[in-house]
Amino acid sequence: MQQNFWQAVWTHPRMLVSRRAQNRSVQTAVRAAYQQFAQQHPEWVASLFDESFLNKEAAVLFANNTLPSATRLAIAWCNQFGTGLSAKKAADIERALPPAKTFLALVNQELNR
């Protein structure tokens, strides 16, 4: 029993450091991807697919060292504007899917460096 306790004490901080490092790498990849995205798609940055959006509304989607689907990212982008008519919101989500896919592809590229 005593050995399991000390083993857990020793292992647990390592797991935390490991998770923090992984989260940092995703956060770093998101920041680097955003720089590329902003240069390639200034029209979407002007449409608030920007750093503020990624740091606030979309931040939870990148938590736990995971990447969201493009659909979830597009929905989060639409949700920052509040609720609207379902048909318009659905159209906005469809319109936001290509840039969301592009952004996630850039994040994946950064993670695989």
Image: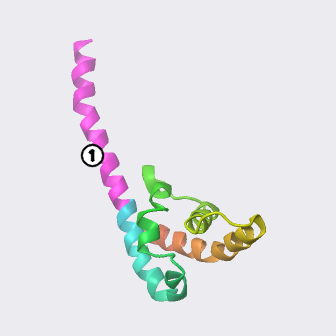
Look at the image and give the residue range highlighted in magenta: 1-25
Closer to the camera, 56 or 112? Answer: 56
Magenta run includes residue 3: yes
- Which element carries disc 1, helix, strand or loop? helix
Magenta run includes residue 101: no
Circle 1: residue type: Val
Q: Residue furthest top?
A: 1
Q: Is residue 48 above or below residue 40?
A: above
Q: Position of residue 18 (x, y in %)?
A: 31, 47
Please state, as top left, top right, bottom left or bottom right, where the N terminus lies in the image: top left
Query: Which residue does the image show at 43% across and 76% down from the upper left?
Result: 34
Q: Is residue 6 above or below residue 95?
A: above
Q: Alpha-carbon neighbours of circle 1 within 10 Å: few (<14), some, or many (≥20)?
A: few
Residue designated by label 1: 17
Q: Position of residue 52 (x, y in %)?
A: 42, 71
Closer to the camera, 26 or 63? Answer: 63
Q: Position of residue 94 (x, y in %)?
A: 71, 72
Q: Is residue 102 above or below residue 13?
A: below
Residue 108 visible to an observer of this rendering: yes
Please state, as top left, top right, bottom left or bottom right, where the C terminus lies in the image: bottom left
Provide the major secondary structure of the magenta segment. helix
